[in-house]
Amino acid sequence: MRIYMKKLISIMLALALCFMCTACFNSTETKSINIYFKSAETNELSVNEIKYSGSQNTVDMANFALSHLISGPDDSDFVKTLPENTNLLSLTVKDSVANVDFSEDFATYTGIDELLARFSVVRTLCDIPGISKVSITVKGMPLISNTTGNEVGVLSKKDIVLGVDVVDDVTTTITMYFATSNGINLKAETRNVKTQNTISIEKTIMTELLKGPSSHELSSVLPAGVKVLNVETKDSVCYVNLSEDFVSKFAGGSGMLTVYSVVNSLCSLESVQSVQILIEGEKGAEFGNFVFDEPIYPNMDIVVK
């Protein structure tokens, strides 16, 4: 009888432990999940907090978030970023990397819309505990950028440069090139800036370049009102995507100083050998004596000390 009771107690304890483990694993809690849509007013990502009361399992939360991205926002302050008819085919998370496979409709956008679609997925998933990077495939094949023609690869928060919150990280010295007073040369200016853990160094350089030089002896040659829509480097080519203002507000002339102010500044990075300038996500814009159909290499012959 004693042996029987001991076995019964052991079984009950085991069942209770299993119940407790199951309850913990499937525990639910009401919280907000950040869904990143396009802002209704700008070409930037903007966060929409959605209430979630399901399992705290990473995959469950990620599925919930992606379902909202696919269906689109209810709030008129936001605009859907994913193409119509996009479907989620599979989602797995391994070693903090979310592997997301979409239907072929996901890869139909170009230009800024393509970037917003891609980045909204990455930013949304990387805000979920347990996910730090995202790999996107289309029907099981690697996602290819319609803008650059390159494989997108694995992305993290630091690759997102469209309207995201930032946190100061470390101080970095960057080099930029501005025009000299004679109007025919460029001169380097170094600057110590706070680099930020969600913004690339290329984006930082372009942001500082648009602010203009610190020295009164130098001047900016970038057209007024230009916006940096995106910057990304693949295979040593930096793709800098600029707003239409870069072309439409250009004062005229050869454009040499303006182009090489951008190119030389970005090529001051060891990781960048050439620069492909895009206008609203597209190649081929005409700018003075230039046509932006191929990457441009730095020109140090016009630089003075």
Image (cartoon, rainbow, N blue to C red):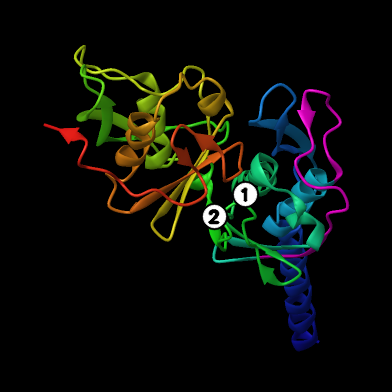
Residue for badge 2:
155
Judged by its main secondary structure, the magenta piece is loop
Q: Which residues are magenta?
A: 71-92
Place residue 72 in its image quadrant.
top right
**Whole-percent x and y of residue 159?**
50, 47
The one nearer the camera, 3 or 99, is 99
Q: Residues within 10 Å of mark 1 (few under 14, many from 20)?
A: many
Q: Quadrant of residue 99?
A: bottom right
Tell me the CA gap for discs 2 and 1: 7 Å
- Tag 2 secondary structure: strand
Please, what secondary structure does the residue beneath circle 1 have?
helix
Q: Is residue 227 visible?
A: no
Within-10-Å neighbours for mark 2: few <14, some 14–19, many 20+: many
Along the viewing direction, whichever of 43 and 179 lies nearer the viewer: 179
In which image quadrant can residue 170 be found? top left
Q: Of 153 and 17, which appears nearest the observer?
A: 153
The N terminus: image quadrant: bottom right
Q: Is residue 95 above or below residue 34?
A: below
The x and y percentages for residue 274 are 37, 51
Q: What is the x, y in percent for residue 48?
A: 72, 31
Q: Residue at x 76, y 50 (%)?
A: 66
Asked if marks 2 and 1 touch (Cβ < 8 Å), the reply is yes
Decide if residue 144 is on the left or right side of residue 235: right
Q: Is residue 296 left or right of residue 171?
A: right
Count of numbered tags: 2
Which residue in the structure is indicated by mark 1?
Answer: 122
Q: Residue at x 58, y 60 (%)?
A: 149
Q: Is residue 31 left or right of residue 155?
A: right
Name the residue type under label 2.
Answer: Leu
First in sequence: mark 2 vs mark 1: 1
Q: Residue at x 79, y 37 (%)?
A: 80
User: Is 90 within the magenta?
Assistant: yes
